[in-house]
Amino acid sequence: MTTLNFQVTPVAGAAFQADVVFQNLVVAGWAGRDLAAIEHHIEELAELGVPRPSSVPLYYRVAVNQCTQAARVQVVGQESSGEIEVFVFQHQGQWLVSIASDHTDRKLEAHSVAMSKQVCIKPVATTAWLLDDVKAHWDQIVLRSWIDENGTRTLYQEGPLASLRTPDDLVAGYLKSLDAAQWPAGTGMTCGTVSAIGGIRAAGNLEMELFDPVLKRSLTWNYQVECLPDVA
């Protein structure tokens, strides 16, 4: 089990602290609505030798102890990279929305996508919103991320949530895969990502933003990556 702490800012009422004990982590892959966009991402990863998925969407299980809210993380080798995703979970009967990075070992991904996700830690932000506060304008919300390249802050990802399946859709799909009626207690799920601008590549950091143009607010998180030597 892993406990993560979130500062939740509702549209109405005071902000509150949500301390959530997670028992399961699910990474929803190939979660686009547009089949052409999914194919683009599949081809993007195919350039790195990643095999095509067996189905879309696909629900990967990752050990929950890989979740962290540390601002500095460690990975083995130089060939991993992050990507911003919406992160949804329940707290006291309410659905909350935050952001996380599905940091992935791109070299290992060519051998096994599931293993490449498992070996890398998953940074999670410390702030969250109520899902009910943003459902009505969900498609207008924007995912963005930046990386540092040669000392320059570079836009790495940008796209609206309209390009991805909604949390309701992904939750229903995961429950169907479990043949279950209720969301498993203590389960968090990342909800897919948008394409990397200029292609997937490693970086020593990832700066993330979930921007709500209707309510004029953002969820943000930034983490640094320390690469450990890949020795044999």
Image (cartoon, grey):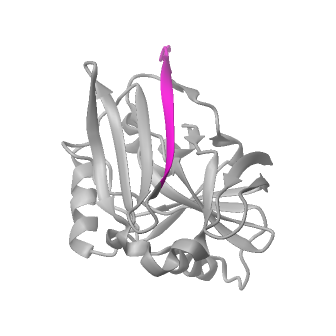
In this rendering, would 195 be left or right of 101? left
Given residues 117 and 33, the one toward you in this image is 33
Total numbered badges shown on the rendered structure? 0
Q: Position of residue 187 (x, y in %)?
A: 70, 62
Residue 165 visible in the picture: no
Taking 83 as reference, is 167 left or right?
A: right
Q: Is residue 229 above or below residue 205?
A: above
Please name the residue shown 49% across and 47% down the image: 102
Please determine whether, in this image, residue 108 is positioned above or below residue 196. above
Q: Main secondary structure of the magenta part?
A: strand
Task: Identify the residue shown where x is 53% and y is 52%.
Answer: 99
Q: Was residue 223 drawn as part of the magenta stretch in this picture?
A: yes
| x and y, in percent, of residue 121 in the image | 58, 37
Taking the magenta stretch, the answer to whether it contains residue 101 is no
Location of residue 89 (image quadrant): bottom right
Q: Nearer the viewer, residue 61 or 4?
A: 4
Front residue (pair 55, 104): 104
In the image shown, does 203 or 93 lie closer to the viewer? Answer: 93
Residue 190 placement (x, y as % from top left): 53, 59
Q: Residue at x 46, y 66 (%)?
A: 215
Say if residue 157 shows up in the picture. yes
Residue shown at 42%/29% (left/top)?
205
Q: Quadrant of residue 98?
A: bottom right
- Tell me where residue 212 appears, x and y as whole percent: 43, 62
Q: Quadrant of residue 199?
A: top left
Vertical relation: 131 (above or below) 220: below
Magenta stretch?
Answer: 218-232
Is residue 170 shown left or right of residue 175? left
